[in-house]
Image (cartoon, grey):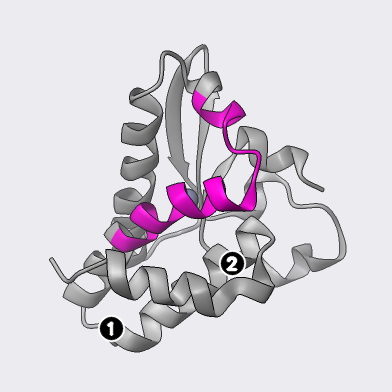
Amino acid sequence: MRAAWLVLIVAGAARPAAAQRAAVPDDFPGITRCERGRAVSRIREDVRDSLDRAQLEAHEAVHRAQAAAFPTCEAFMAELRTARRIIDVELPAYCAQWRVAVAQGADPAETRREFAWRIAAESGAMENRLDVLQRFERECAPA
Ligand SMILES: [Zn+2]
């Protein structure tokens, strides 16, 4: 099901319970979507941990900045049609999230691998997850 990725940029893993059906926005702890031409982010209310919230805020802020470089938010989202483009926009977002996580004490290598796997899964390029990890290592330096 590709359509959801055209309108949603998500951060974090879907809830395990969501595995049996198509994902909906509430499955994701953080999302950025278009509202009347502008990118708007939302962190799910039940994400209470301030460290988690800080990571998600950093991630979604990158997507808002990416969308702002386009004439409209919808034009930005419409571009996200290929795994390659999704990886291109998710890498910097997860990089910002990774920097926050590492500053919070997360293990750099383990977290990088986890995020690379997530990017691969979200883009539908799981078979290329090692390439995604290599790009992450190359393009995401510590802050
Ligand atoms: Zn994202």
Task: Look at the picture and state if 113 lies above or below 14.
Answer: below
Q: Is residue 14 visible?
A: no
The mark that comes first in sequence, 1 or 2, is 1
Task: Say whether residue 142 is magenta.
Answer: no
Observer-nearest of 53 and 142: 142
- Which residue bears the numbered disc 1? 108
Amino acid found under the numbered disc labelled 2:
Ala
In the image, 90: left or right of 10? left
**Helix, strand, or loop for circle 2?**
helix
Q: Tell me the magenta residue range.
A: 76-95
Badge 1 element: helix
Q: Position of residue 71 (x, y in %)?
A: 41, 13
Can you say whether 106 is above or below 91 in the image? Answer: below
**Circle 1: residue type:** Pro
Could you tell me residue 127's position as x and y percent? 68, 75
In the shown orientation, is residue 34 left or right of residue 105?
right
Residue 55, picture quadrant: bottom left
User: In this rendering, would 46 be left or right of 141?
Assistant: right
The residue that label 2 is drawn on is: 120
Seen as rendered, the residue at the extreme right is 20
Q: How far apart are marks 1 and 2 (CA)?
A: 18 Å
Q: Position of residue 119 (x, y in %)?
A: 53, 63
- 61 and 51: which is toward the camera: 61
